[in-house]
Every structure is written in C-alpha cells, then in structure tokens.
Amino acid sequence: MRLKRLANGNQSIYLDYYKDGKREYEFLKLYLMPERTPADKDTNAQTLRLANAVKSKRVVELQNNAHGFNNGGTRSKANVIDYIKAVADTKRIKAGGGKRTTAATYLALAWHIEQYSGLKTTFRQVDKNYCSGFIDYLQKAKNRNNGLPLNENTQRGYMKKFEAVINAAITDEVTNTNPFKQIKPENKPQKHKTEISYLTIDEVKLLENTESLSPIIKQAFLFSCYTGLRFSDVQNLTWGKLQTDNNGGTFINYVQKKTQKQEYLPIPQKAVEFLPDKADAKDTDKVFYLPSGGYTNLQLKAWAALAGLKKHLTFHIARHTYATILLSLGAGIETISKNLGHSEIKTTQAHYAAIENKLQRAAVNLFDKLDGLTD
C-alpha cells in the first residue's frame, strides 16, 4: 500500500504490485485526511481498514492467478487463512468497523484451521477427506479464549462459516467445488435448540429489592430488563440519546452497535426509574459508566447469589427477560421484533416461539375454567 500526498493536504491510497519484475499500481479512490479532530482520526481508521480489505482480496486474486491466468477448473493454491481474513475484513467494514461482528467468528475459524492444518493451508487441500477431518478436529477442539471444549452448536457454527467461505471462494473462482456437500448430514455437527434463559417478573422484583455490590451495574441491568438493550448499547448510551416525544414519553434514538442500524425505542417509565441522576452531565456523557464485560458478569453473579437466585445473570438474559415480559403482557411478536432491533421477524420467532406457544396454550386453557358454555 502506498500513499501520495495531494495539494489539499489529503493523501490518496494506491496499491503497488509487481508482475514479471515490473511495478504496476491500482488507484483505490480512497483518501486519508489531515487528522484535526477525533472524528477525522476515526474516519481515516475506517478508510485504512477498507483499503486493507481490498489489499487482502487482491493478494488472494494474485495467488489464484486471477489476473489473466485461470486455474483451469482445479482447486486453487490460494491460502485459505488469508482468504478468510479478507472475508472477515469485508464483514467488519460492512458492520461499521466494530469488533463485535461476524468478523470475529471468521477470525476464530481461521485460528482453528491453523491449528488443524497449519498456516499454509491452500484450497487445493480442501477436499472431502479434509472437511471430514476438520469436523473430527472440531469435536476435540477447545475454545481459544477459555480452553473449554466446543459444544455441538459452536462446532456446527464453525462448519457453516467454513462452508460459506468455500461458497464465496467458488464465486470468486478461487475454487470450484464445496466438499462439505459430499458429506452426509448425519455426519455433520447437529443443531441443538438451547432453552432461552430469562427472569420472571417476580425474579426481577426480587433483584430490585436486593442490594448489589455495584449499584451502577444493578441500575444498568434492570434498565436492560425494561428496554431490551444489549450490554454494548447500554454501555454506549449517552444522555443526548434519551429524548421526549410529544406525549411526554421517553424514547431512545440510537444506532445499534451490533447492526449499525438507527433505532427508535420507546421505553417505559419503569426503565426511566433506573437511570442514574444526570446532575450536570452533558448530552455527550455516558449514562452508565460500566466496567468491562468480564468484571460486570462477576458482579452480576455475586448479586444473584445475594438475591438467592440460581440463574446465571448476563445482560443477554436481561434482553430475553424484556421480550418474555412483553409476550406475557400480550404484545405481538412483530412489535417485540421491532423493539429488539431485529432486522427480520424470523429471528425473533426462532428465539421466542416456544415461549409464545406456551403462553398461547395457557390462554386457551382458560376456556376449561368456564362453566356451561352456551350458544
């Protein structure tokens, strides 16, 4: 990657590559600006990430002889791990450059492939036997962060991501077949539905009445129970995002960190009760100054113990609690999906279908309590 300074102070970005000993270049039509403000610095960082993603893709294309030299329909010598990292860069940029994106899963996949077959793994090696062996590897593999064995859903997730990588490589003409299609479904990791963990209204009330070692974490958690916000969105919530509508109700106007989508979320007065005192805070100041996720979870665990709760508290449970309470109060799945910020209603249905069915059955059973139905 090469930079060229322009008369206006900006720098244009080029890619240099060498073919038959001769240098050629590609102008990316991307520019770095003088960093006069923090916003300029963030913009330049995102521009560089995009430039590096293009560079990674060009490297893969060169490895595949994509510049005028077709591989003749055989599996490519392109490096699998380099290709996955290029895919991860693209996913990260599409998600706004954050770390909490699908990109992290692709990078974890690249790490497991390195453990399985080494850094120099090429698409030419990826045949049916390789894929079967990778499935066997996942059954014995450990999580790189905590050293625990991978559960079957996680194994399946990595396999599906690897399949997606191969399909993308087929589109890019890096390879021509997906060997996973040659493996019988029963020989692949199976998907298991995990029961959603949530708090009942009584359990939420119990927590409200139990002192926590960290009052700010208690406030933030209960705020999440009544708004459905993720930990990252609670952590990044600023006072200016809390606004009042024409009827005097409170709503949050924010951009979801995970999806980078603009959201409008009405919140109940119950949630407002758990906001800290604003005092002289500015609109740009954070509402909840929270510690890291790991330390927060430790505090939640201690708080649950003080309350006598056996459940493992996390902010994700608070989010499920919000949705479940709304369901129990009769809110429609479409409304809940919108409030949770899901891009597709099927995501919400997949998570809460069992709970919704349970509530529907309970409602229908009310008929059994009626005496002597008449026409």
Image (cartoon, rainbow, N blue to C red):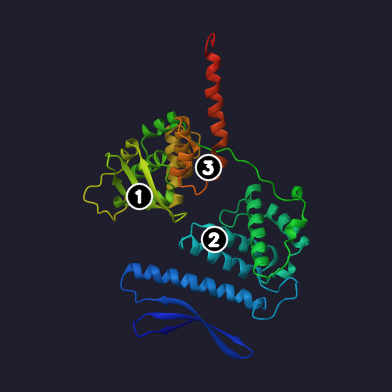
Instruction: Pick out the residue farthest to the bottom.
Output: 21
Sooner in the amino-acid sequence: mark 2 or mark 3: 2
Work out which residue is located at the far front of the displayed protein and give it.
375
Quadrant in which the C terminus appears = top right
- Find the distance from the CA under tag 2 to the CA under tag 1: 26 Å
Q: Nearer the viewer, residue 99 or 363?
A: 363
* Residue name at image x 53 percent, y 37 percent: 197
Which amino acid does the dot numbered 3 rest on? Thr
Q: How many marks?
A: 3
- Dot 1: within a 10 Å radius of its alpha carbon, few (fewer than 14), some, or many (20 or more) residues? some
What number is the disc on residue 253?
1
Return the residue found at the far top.
372
Indicate whether 251 appears above or below 129.
Answer: above
Which residue is disc 3 drawn over? 348
**CA gap, disc 2 to disc 3?**
22 Å
Compared across the picture, whether 287 is left or right of 260 comes to left
What is the quadrant of residue 261 in the picture?
bottom left
Residue, disc 2: 103
Q: Amino acid at mark 1?
A: Asn
Eye-nearest disc, 2 or 3: 3
Name the foreground residue: 328 vs 300.
Answer: 328
Q: Secondary structure at mark 3?
A: helix
Residue 313 appears in the figure: no
Please tell me the numbered disc located at residue 333: none
Q: Amino acid at mark 2?
A: Ala
Secondary structure beneath label 2:
helix
Q: Is residue 115 left or right of residue 200?
A: right
Query: Is residue 188 shown above or below 321?
Result: below
Which sits earlier in the primary sequence, circle 3 or circle 1? 1
* Apparent side of residue 285 relative to residue 365 in the rendered image (left or right): left
Q: Is residue 252 above or below residue 247?
A: below
Helix, strand or loop at mark 1: strand
